[in-house]
Amino acid sequence: MAAQKGRDLLLKIGTGTPETFQTVAGLRTRSLTLNSGTVDVTHAESAGQWRELLAGAAVRSATVSAAGIFSDQTSDDLVRAAFFAGETRNYQLIVPDFGTLSGPFQITALEYAGTYDGEVTFSITLASAGVLAFVAA
């Protein structure tokens, strides 16, 4: 994958029936973290006393973090409503020339901030809440 512009990484929220995805507006920073825990099955007879891990038994998760400005009321309304309702909604994270990660996430943090001489900014953290799908670009 060649170098990509960070601004091309998009976070979208699912809306409506049939579901369509709307870009969460005004993102300045965003990141995706994929995690996989381990299940240690080491025992007294493990070869050379080396740790052994049980393949395929770990809990996998993803966390998406983003920050920016709400440039339209619709995006602000969607995100705020999902947070206060504690909803699990479908989201997409589009990574240019890599692919799209999509599936259910819940907003675990939503922060608003501002200075007296600047715009209101927000930060959002999403935690995976089910099976995620990845489609390569």
Image: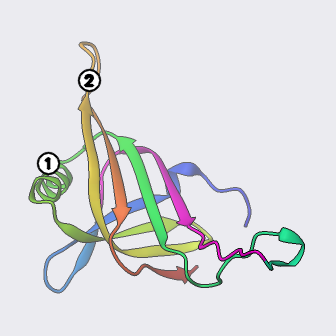
Where's the C terminus, which quadrant? bottom right
Q: What residue is pinned by disc 1?
A: 73
- What residue is shown at x 50% (from left), y 52% (from top)? 31
> What are the residue bounds of the magenta stretch?
23-44
Q: Is residue 30 above or below residue 44?
A: above
Q: What residue is pinned by disc 2?
A: 114
Q: Amino acid at mark 2?
A: Gly
Q: Amino acid at mark 1?
A: Gln
Percent x, y of residue 5: 60, 52
Percent x, y of residue 116: 23, 13
Is 48 on the left-hand or right-hand side of 115?
Answer: right
Percent x, y of residue 65: 42, 50
Is 16 on the left-hand or right-hand side of 2?
Answer: left
User: Which color mode does the image show?
Assistant: rainbow
Disc 1 crowd, CA 10 A, few/some/many (<14, 14-19, 20+): few
Q: CA distance from mark 1 to mark 2?
A: 17 Å
Where's the N terminus, which quadrant? bottom right
